Image (tube, rainbow, N blue to C red):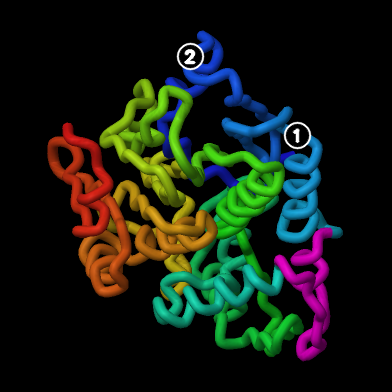
Amino acid sequence: MQEFPHKCLKVWLLPVFAALAAGCGGADYQAVDGRTMGTSYRVVARCPATLDQAPIDAVLARVNASMSNWDENSEISRFNASPIGEWTTLSPPLAEMMRTALELSAMSDGAFDVSVGALVSAWGFGPAPAGEVPGDMEVEAALARTGFRHLELDGDRLRKTLDLSIDLSALAKGFGVDAVAETVTEQGCTDYLVEIGGEVRVRGNRPEGHPWRLGIESPNGEQARAAHRILALTKGAIATSGDYRNYFERDGQRYPHTIDPRLGRPVTHDLASASVVHASAMWADGYATLIAVLGPEAGLAFADSNDLAAYLLVRTGDGFESRSTPRMESLLAPD
């Protein structure tokens, strides 16, 4: 069962694993991979001893058990089912994520809204697959159950003043990447790449001794996946929110998974993807989603005003146009 929805495969990492398989780089680099949150994860790390996969799997299991809307027994599912007005004590990781989510919701005036769960379900991007396109009355009913200002966080306690539903899909993979990076660091690994479903965090260098090279995927539909631009990073995380992998079509109309919580409907602008580099994969994940909702003009303006490293790919009549902030320009490898 899929625990979190895919956005898309966002980074081009296969050369790293090919190099390891061929024996390139130092022998102290190791790779492990597995499944989590309905997608795959991969870790490449330079460690003083054998990289222990068990703590990685354990931390990812805890993230899923806390934050998955697909698990009715998860911590967030239990909160969603709790009575209006009742305080719920959150685990420290979930409290941290909720603080981030509410900050993003407030700073975007609801373009990012962690209470979007009813709308996600109405449009078929939740645990139940998409069916018919919801009617106006159904959308309005879901919109009436949305609004981050109806959430109150007091330390590690959370309550709602409306029968709303929290959805953490825009932050959970990034949070998982950060948690795995901490686990790898605790094992003494000095250089690493951690990737979950396209969200990536790196430190140090790749096996060949150069900065990690990460490709921003070209949003080319069903064609062979390829990198549109390459980033060279020695520290930080990148996340992308795109509309070209997770969508459905009805009667010739395309409905992407990116929902504008202010309108209650999937976005209709021309922004195909938004990529953000940040110290934290969780924050990069959230910012990328926020910009993907705002669209090309407002999204780029938001990124500029908040001094973010952001790269946008916008649909044009004959392809895609790239737009980026000054901070992102400094990270892009030459064409």
- Give the percent coordinates (x, y) of residue 35: 70, 34
**CA distance for labels 2 and 1:** 22 Å
Q: Name the residue: 37% across, 30% down.
A: 210
* Residue farthest front in this picture: 48
Q: In this view, does 335 lie to the left or right of 288?
A: left
- Residue at 32% over, 64% down: 308
Residue furthest out toward the left: 318
Of residues 302 and 233, the one drawn nearer to the viewer in this rendering: 233
The amino acid on which the numbered mark 2 sits, given as a three-letter code, is: Cys
Q: Which residue is drawn at 37% across and 54% down?
A: 276
Identify the image quadrant of the C terminus. top left
Give amino acid for label 1.
Answer: Gln
Tell us which disc is closer to us: 2 or 1: 2
Q: Which mark is residue 173?
A: none
Q: The magenta stretch spans which residues?
A: 74-93
Say which residue label 2 marks: 24
Identified at 57% across, 69% down, the residue is 116
**Marked residue nearer the N-terminal end (2 or 1):** 2
Seen from this angle, which residue lies furthest right? Answer: 73
Q: Mark 1 points at which residue?
A: 53
**Does 335 sit above or below residue 251?**
above
Task: Examine the rendering and report whether any part of residue 255 can be seen.
Answer: no
Magenta span contains residue 79: yes
The picture places residue 4, in percent across and down from the top left corner, at: 64, 48
Q: How many labels does the image show?
A: 2
Q: Are discs 2 and 1 less than 8 Å apart at CB?
A: no
Q: Is residue 144 above or below residue 171?
A: below
- Left or right: 312, with 15 as reference point: left
For this view, does 72 lie left or right of residue 163? Answer: right
Asked which secondary structure carries label 2, the reply is loop
